[in-house]
Amino acid sequence: MPEFWIGHRRYRTKKDAGEAVQEVLYRYTVGSIVDGEEDHLLLLDLLDLHHEAAEKIGPGVEAFAIAPPQRGPYPGFEVIRTDGSRIDFSYLTCLKPPTHRQQVLNVMRDEVKATINAYFASRQAAGTLLSDQSRTPLETTNTAVSYFRGPSFVEIAEAFARSAGGWETIELTPSTEPGLGRFSDRDLARQWFTHHQERAELGLLSTRENQRRPRT
């Protein structure tokens, strides 16, 4: 059975990944908030794998809670959104194989990583590590580059996919790293890099501020 990734976390098999999620689920009591930072981050990355992630996340994730059983004897996870609303999600659904669109989105993020890193380095060199939302000073270990001031990453990617003829027309090389390959057509990869660079309006937030925003 092939290895499985949840965000940057690598598991030997999907079964191992599921057991890691279950370990979080059963470490907390029903109704309690998942207050461990690493547990919270794991669930954020797990939720990104859900085929209805945007609908589940809504305006942004404030926290996760352990929901009482809905069907059968087992508890589950619940998203507490930043507007106070709540919705459950199935971790088993999240562990299903990613769609081609999800795979391409992951590769797109990797293909423009140099732009994100360069933006952060420029802000650090200029001595402007401040949250562009709250204006609070940021530590390098508590900083996220965010798209909160303009079109989201997904909106930029969707527009490019449409111009390329649709998600299914974008071919990827075989995956050899964190669930990622590369664009098979390197000319198309350069077009994507330029498309992203021309449209991305980047800014800095604290890690927590960024976590509370929609994951787009």
Image (tube, rainbow, N blue to C red):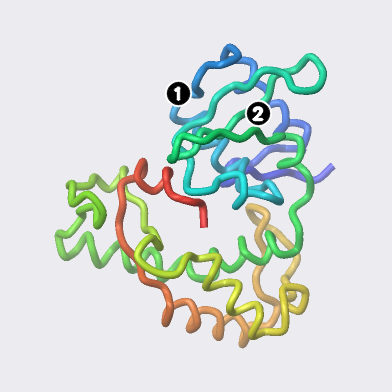
Circle 1: residue type: Asp
| N-term-proximal mark, 2 vs 1 | 2
Q: Residue furthest right?
A: 1
Residue occupying image coordinates x 62% and y 65%: 107
The image position of residue 185, as x and y in percent, is 68, 83
- Relative to 12, residue 181 above or below: below
Image side of residue 91 versus residue 132, left or right: right
- The quarter of the picture where residue 103 lies is bottom right
In the displayed structure image, the side of residue 216 where residue 188 appears, left or right: right
Image coordinates for residue 84, horizontal then vertical, percent: 46, 34
Q: Looking at the image, is 185 positioned above or below residue 21?
A: below
For badge 2, the amino acid type reads Val
Q: Nearer the viewer, residue 176 or 185?
A: 185
Q: In which image quadrant can residue 46 be found?
A: top right
**Residue at (41, 73) in percent of width and height:** 200
For this rendering, which residue is in front, 52 or 157? Answer: 52
Question: Would residue 121 be found to the left or right of residue 88 on screen?
Answer: left
- Tell me: residue 43, above or below residue 3: above
- Estimate the x, y position of residue 54 in percent, counting from the top left: 60, 52
Q: Residue at x 38, y 60 (%)?
A: 148
For the N terminus, give its image quadrant: top right
Q: Which residue is mark 2?
A: 21
In the current view of this chain or complex, which residue is farthest to the left?
A: 127
Question: Callout 2: helix, strand or loop?
Answer: helix
Q: Between marks 2 and 1, how big is the CA–CA gap?
A: 15 Å
Helix, strand, or loop for circle 1? Answer: loop
Reading the image, the residue beneath label 1 is: 35
For label 1, count other residues whose C-alpha is less than 10 Å away and answer few (under 14), some (14-19) or many (20+).
Answer: few
**Mark 2 surroundings within 10 Å by alpha-carbon count, few (fewer than 14), some (14 through 19), many (20 or more):** some
